[in-house]
Amino acid sequence: MADLSRLVPRMRPHATTIFGQMSALATELGAVNLGQGFPDVDGPQELKDIAVAAIVDGSGNQYPPAHGLLDLRSAISEHQQRHYGLTVSPDTGVVVTTGASEALAAAVLALVEAGDEVIVLEPYFDLYAAIIAMAGATRVAVPLAVPESGTGDGFTLDERALAKAITPRTRMIIVNSPHNPTGMVLSRDELEAIARIAIDNDLLVISDEAYEHLVFGGAKHVPIAALPGMFERSVTIGSGGKSFSFTGWKVGWASGPTDLITAVRVVRQHLSYVSAGPFQAAIAAGLRFPDSYFSDFADDLQVRRDLLSAGLRDLGFDVLPSDGTYFITSDIRPLGHLDGRSFCDWLVRDIGVAAIPIEALADDEVVFAPYVRWTFCKRPEVLDQALDRLSVIRQGA
Ligand SMILES: *Cc1c(COP(=O)(O)O)cnc(C)c1O
């Protein structure tokens, strides 16, 4: 590993990300990369044309307004109203950020004091841990309940464990649904349980909804801010990269009540100051797409989810249900493996397929050891190629 001696100790545990490590290995070894979740087909041409035009005609080339283009803030406000019945002011209740990542960072840095405790449900997107450390706060990981092997059930909220984790220092819960890495979508009951705990203990909630439009079948995305008593204590975060398959553009946003968004705006203006103008104009148009864009996008992804799920199941993996995101989780125990980290290391080196060990995204490495995350946001021929390489696992088992 690189020399970390000059890095502040509180950031040393966050020096590398499993996604970066696995992608580097996949590239070096020529493996099919089902590790990192980024689409291998771009989003709509219409949005590219808008971004290009904003560069060519000069409208997007100088600093946009500090909190984001008014057109984009209005589109975000309309989007929250149209899809969820949430009323947010484009003037005071929305801030455009450099990806959902910066929205998360700004929200934690603005709303959490050093020494406060922040609850994350594990496994968790690793950025949360790094940001909590940057804020000098303390991460408290509450494990999701794991399903009994072979039942076909998925992870669920452990309400009792969440309630037990609250202390007088707890300030915030970070919620992520649809959930990366597992692909679970929190049910209304589960969201209500989190809401009850947040209200009873006067906690803030950051709701990372980067995958809000990537839900499948009968599953439905409900922002926790839409539950009674929750809007005033929640910051809701979205990602243009995830919703429109332009992960390289890094347009994200946070929305919520004026007092919370005012705080987030103050910190965010000192992080990147503003976010890239040409992409803001394009994402504004995307957010106004008709509902059919979003449902077609989810349907298309669902076909690929089904292809990979069926293929993995056929090889003998226990495949957990995925109701959203780019990801499915499998239990590797039926194939005779116990540890996801060593399994993924072997897989990328000897089989030529990269996947992500869930334990790398959890504080409790024992409970989550047998689970591996695979992304299906790749072209069908890429998924087929991966399954083809994986076929020796069954034969060799
Ligand atoms: C990708 C992702 C983000 C970051 O989104 P960007 O818009 O690319 O910054 C945040 N949260 C989750 C859960 C993600 O998977």
Image (cartoon, rainbow, N blue to C red):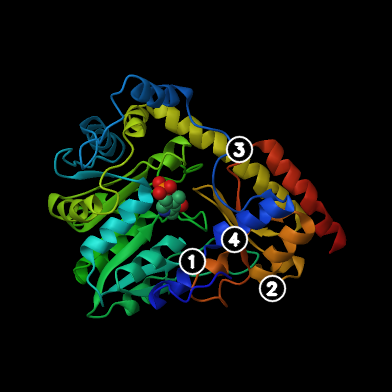
Residue 335 visible, this angle: yes
Q: CA distance from mark 4 to mark 1?
A: 18 Å
Q: Position of residue 90 (x, y in %)?
A: 18, 38
For discs 3 and 1, the disc positioned in front in the rendered view: 1
Which of discs 4 and 1 lies nearer the camera? The answer is 4
Crowding near the residue tagged with mark 3, few <14, some 14–19, many ≥20 C-alpha atoms within 10 Å: some
Which dot, 4 or 2, sits closer to the camera?
4
On-image quarter of the C terminus: bottom right
Residue behind label 1 places its C-beta within 8 angstroms of ligand 1 = no
Q: CA distance from mark 4 to mark 3?
A: 28 Å
Query: In terms of secondary structure, where does tag 3 sit?
Result: helix
Local packing at callout 1 (Cα closer than 10 Å; few below 14, some 14-19, many 20+) is many
Residue tagged 1: 123
* Residue at horizontal 57 percent and vertical 54 percent from the top: 321
Q: Sequence order check: which comes first, mark 4 or mark 2?
A: 4
Q: Residues within 10 Å of mark 2 (few under 14, many from 20)?
A: some
Which of 172/299 is in front?
172
